[in-house]
Image (cartoon, rainbow, N blue to C red):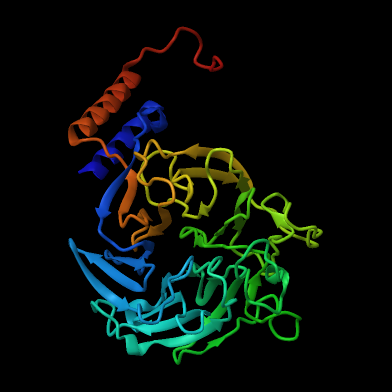
Amino acid sequence: MKSSVLCLARVAAGAAGLVLAALPAWALTATPVAGGLEAPVFLTAPSGDTRLFVVEKAGLIKTLSGGGTSTLLDLRSQVDAAGEGGLLGLAFDPGFASNGRFYVDYIDRSTKATVVAMYTAPSATAPAADPGSGKTLISIAQPADRTNHKAGWIGFRPGDANNLYIATGDGGSGNDPENRAQNLNDNLGKILRITPQADGSYTVPADNPYAGSTPGNDEIWASGLRNPYRNSFDRANGDFWIADVGQSTREEINLERAGTPGGRNYGWRALEGSGDNPGVPDAPPAGAVGPLFDYGRANGDGSIIGGYVYRGSFEQGLDGAYFYGDFVSGRIFTLRESGGVVTEVIDRTDELGRPFGPNQLTSFGEDGLGNLYAMGLDGRVVLIAAAVPEPGTWALMAFGVLALAGLSRRRPRPPGPATAPRTA
């Protein structure tokens, strides 16, 4: 009903020479969809799936469907959730519908290492996966005495379905004391890219920048990152958005266009955002890539939470806007970019009704249909969407546009020759 009325309004607007943007904009809402969860830190779903899969920091993956909750996987006995650790990442294989495979990223209770493992569900619709099906793809050593900067995001890029991207933090403490982010023989402070195999092993894509005889670890795709905790791929074009948590002055967002070769160095620890890191004397790395956007901490902000480029909305002007937030302040923003330049930054916090307070917002997530969610340590998940007018409002909007179209057709021509120039 609503979509057909909207199409009718568009047709009428075109006939009248009108612009739909002149119609009232619809405010955004944050609608609760779940509560009572234990520290949810991520949400995702296979493409086209209507279920929501929520990652809890302590080690559970819960499935929300039809008003009920079930457990897909319980890894609590394996997960160390101290500090910034825990079960932090989840990605479904692009072939999940046929192979049932999905991947997790967590801090191991016994070794304290980052583990990326593959699990297999009995079928794409099975309510639970067998914990015994787990196979460790890669284990990345972490400093055993540090509990921060564990990153944890993993994901598959549209158009690059065979390769899993893995975000790692620099291993913790302050100012990356071992300078791991710049060490190409260390997988911390990096984006990694590997090709998972059905037997639980992995290979390295031949076009990884340090594969083969090139000095540096074969798995590394990008370097110079502090704690790229939440990242995303634009589902429309494969662009890679990397949000890197700052040290003490700047929070940053990096943008890697689809098709960009690997090997980018984002500058940490010498650089923090667009400026020098005041905590170390290092010179900037040669060829370091600056962020698309960064911001300071003058307004109570202090730890960026990366989000997603919004797709599929019919609110005018929202499609293509990148959502992100800040953990310390709880604020939520959108920005838009064109040609690598940020053209618009909007604070959406009040519009959304301030869904999360300070030190609560943990992540954004997309479902299998492209809808956008946010979640917090208080156990809630909210759907971010346009507030759609009531049916009566739709009818009035359509009637008004049709009436304007009719008036346009009946308006008498102004006097003068038919070839007179038009004026604005």
Q: Nearer the viewer, residue 2 or 4?
A: 2
The residue positioned farthest toward the top in the image shown: 415
The residue positioned farthest toward the front in the image shown: 145
Location of residue 110 with respect to 294 vertically, above or below: below
User: Toward which corner of the image does residue 86 lie, by quadrant?
Assistant: bottom left
The image shows residue 31 at horizontal and vertical percentages of 28, 47
- Residue at 55 percent of width and 48 percent of height: 302
Q: Is residue 240 left or right of residue 332?
A: right
The image shows residue 44 at horizontal and vertical percentages of 37, 65
The residue positioned farthest toward the bottom in the image shown: 199
Q: Is residue 191 left or right of residue 320?
A: right
- Residue at 64 percent of width and 72 percent of height: 221
- Residue at 41 percent of width and 32 percent of height: 21
Q: Quadrant of the N terminus?
A: top left
User: Toward which corner of the image does residue 19 lie, by quadrant?
Assistant: top left
Q: Is residue 60 left or right of residue 197?
A: left
The image shows residue 96 at horizontal and vertical percentages of 36, 77
Q: Is residue 275 shown to the viewer in this render?
A: yes
Q: Nearer the viewer, residue 208 or 246?
A: 246
Location of residue 119 with respect to 257 vertically, above or below: below
Location of residue 144 with respect to 305 vertically, above or below: below
Q: Is residue 339 shown to the viewer in this render?
A: no
The image shows residue 241 at horizontal and vertical percentages of 55, 58
**Count of numbered circles in the view:** 0
Q: Is residue 27 left or right of residue 344?
A: left
